[in-house]
Image (cartoon, grey):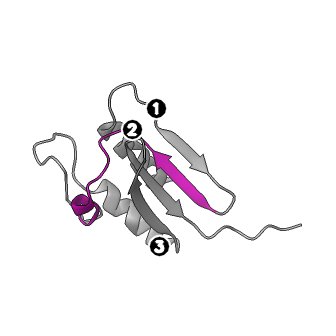
Amino acid sequence: KRAIRNLAENAIKHAPRDTVVEFVVEEDGTVTVMDRGPGISSEERELIFQRFWRRDRNQQGSTGLGLSIVQRIAELHGATVEVQNRVLGGAQFSLHFVAAAKTA
């Protein structure tokens, strides 16, 4: 829950005002959070999961821990986190969890 909340808060913080943040939950255990913000440069993709890293160091109310917490939670649950830019603009973060086996 915390990882998804952190992704949602991050999307809301970086997307333009009045933008819809989308969530997709798939049967294979993937949870995706998508926004229509500025996206993430290839250089930043190497940095965003580092503790205390912030795009804007002058921004108040941000510690730079949100995405590093997401990555750590994913690791603890045997999941992975992936980030990419959307074709029409914005970022897309996907948490890939191993889906629980279905019981009959």
Q: Is residue 36 magenta?
A: yes
Q: Earlier in the sequence, mark 1 or mark 3?
A: 1
Question: Foreground mark, 2 or 3?
Answer: 2
Where disc 2 sits, the SS reads loop
What is the C-alpha distance between the residues marked 2 and 3?
29 Å
Q: Is residue 18 above or below residue 88?
A: above
How many labels sit on residues?
A: 3
Where disc 1 sits, the SS reads loop
Q: Which residue is mark 2?
A: 36
Q: Earlier in the sequence, mark 1 or mark 2?
A: 1
* Percent of width and height locating residue 92: 43, 51
Q: Which residue is mark 3?
A: 76
Q: Amino acid at mark 1?
A: Val
Q: Nearer the viewer, residue 95 or 60?
A: 95
Which residue is located at x 30 percent, y 63 percent?
Answer: 49
Left/right of residue 22 with respect to residue 41 in the rendered view: right
What is the C-alpha distance between the residues marked 1 and 3?
30 Å
**Residue that extends furthest to the top in the rendered view of this protein:** 18
Q: Please identify the quarter of the rendering in which residue 66 is found.
A: bottom left
* Percent of width and height locating residue 101: 75, 71
Which residue is located at x 41 percent, y 29 percent?
Answer: 19
Where disc 3 sits, the SS reads helix
- State the quadrant of the C terminus: bottom right
Q: Amino acid at mark 2?
A: Arg
Q: Does the CB distance between marks 1 and 2 fall below 8 Å?
A: yes
What is the C-alpha distance between the residues marked 1 and 2?
8 Å
**What range of the chain is rendered magenta?**
29-48
Q: Which mark is residue 20?
A: 1
Which residue is located at x 22 percent, y 46 percent?
Answer: 62
